[in-house]
Image: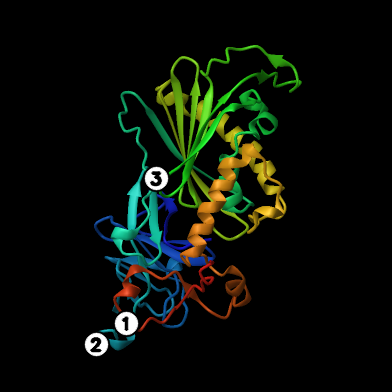
Amino acid sequence: MYINFWYPICTATDLDAQNPQRVEMLGVRLVAFRDASGQAHVLADTCIHRGGSLGKGKVVGDCVQCPYHGWEFDGDGVCTKIPSMGDKKPPARAKVDSYPVQEKYGIVFAFLGDLPEAERPPLLEVSETDTSKWRISGPLVFEIDGYYQRSIENGMDPTHNEFVHPSQGAPALDEDRFAVNEQEWGCEFLAEFGELKDTESHDKVVERDTSGDLSAGSQHLGPNHMLTTINIPGGYCFMQYFYEAPLSDRRTRIFFVNNRNNTLDAAADDGINGQFMNVAQEDRVVIEGLYPKRTPDNLTKELMTSSDAAVVKYREYLAEWDKKGWAIDMKTMQANEGDIAYAIPCPARRESGNWILDPVPLLAPQS
């Protein structure tokens, strides 16, 4: 798991004006809350006084209040009030990490890392904004008992459809029409599919035009954002955005925004989204059964073929972020579970010292 990327924290509707939300992400605890103006904020969850959970407290004006002793922290993570000190100003060390936030597509995102704004990887942007041509639905939120990298790799794999997705007609990849292209923060592919198979027998070929009118592809941005494009006959298209939240190295929460340029009536949302959630369930069964559960750190540990080109390229990007020293040392964190309250370092740590919470341990940059 990596610092210095954008992560989905919660849906906008789940974050009301009265109650903070406690969220686990990258193996650490965070709190999200709205201030008096409705602005969303994300902080480290641990009160630096005696370890209280800010997420179990309440919102007071522009601050989140610790339920243990009433310490109040504003959206910048600065403690503005210590009740036991009366009118005295809290000490400078009374602060917790605060993370940049964007609220888009019905999702509250936080940048979990310490990079300055100019150096941050981007958020995967939804490009279908013309609601006269597109029906934008979601986010749908679901969880899997699997590692997020395995989930992203599944989406970057065009050959599993034939065997995992009978509900989509078990489309078979035409390997001659498949190429991977590199971008700054990820890679993409578009694959054209040949024959469709009968969903009952799975081996009876259904004749269809193979002139390229049925195609699908995916692109990832960073380790946890993915866009899947599905083009079907008639010029119809589904643009599916997946923002994945690694709660831990064993469980992932997925925020799914499903856009379409056909059947624009909102009344069709449940039926169409239900079909794609059935597809997600088919993926879930496979992902949760993978072993090892986490992505091998060496390509020699799994036998790859040419059809795995996008997966191999994804792992090469992961290796680049390893070299930057952005990978969290999960084994050390797990060894210290219950003894040390870690925080993902925020941008303010580059500007000031005297922090109480220990930064998450990072693996040494890989050569």
SS at mark 3? loop
Above or below for 211 versus 101: above
**Circle 2 sits on which residue?**
88
Q: Using a 10 Å C-alpha cutoff, classify the residue at mark 2 as few (fewer than 14 neighbours), some (14 to 19) or many (20 or more).
A: few
Q: Which mark is residue 82?
A: 1
Q: Residue at x 28, y 55 (%)?
A: 38
Describe the element under mark 2 as helix, strand or loop. Answer: loop
Q: CA distance from mark 2 to mark 1?
A: 8 Å
Residue 35: quadrant of the picture:
bottom left
- Percent x, y of residue 133: 34, 23
Q: Name the mark on residue 320.
A: none
How dense is the environment of label 3, judged by Cα within 10 Å: few (below 14), some, or many (20 and up)? some
Residue 119: quarter of image: bottom left
* For marks 1 and 3 on the same chain, the one whose residue lies earlier in the sequence: 1
Residue 88 x/y as whole percent: 24, 87
Write the residue at 38% across / 52% down.
108
Nearer to us in this view, 166 or 158: 158
Q: Amino acid at mark 2?
A: Lys
User: Earlier along the polypeptide chain: callout 2 or callout 3?
Assistant: 2
Q: Would you say the residues marked 2 and 1 are in contact, meaning their CB atoms lie under 8 Å apart?
A: yes
Q: Nearer the viewer, mark 1 or mark 3?
A: 3
Please say if 28 is above or below 299: below
**Is 245 in front, or is 228?**
228
Task: Give the residue at mark 3.
Answer: 124
Label 1 to label 3: alpha-carbon separation: 40 Å
- Labelled pair 2, 3 in contact (Cβ < 8 Å): no
Query: Which amino acid type is marked by label 1?
Result: Ile
Q: Is residue 284 left or right of residue 345?
A: right
- What count of labels does the image hold? 3
Instruction: Residue 182: give x, y in percent of width and height.
Output: 46, 43
In the rendered image, is residue 220 in sight?
no
Identify the residue at image location x=61%, y=49%. Answer: 150
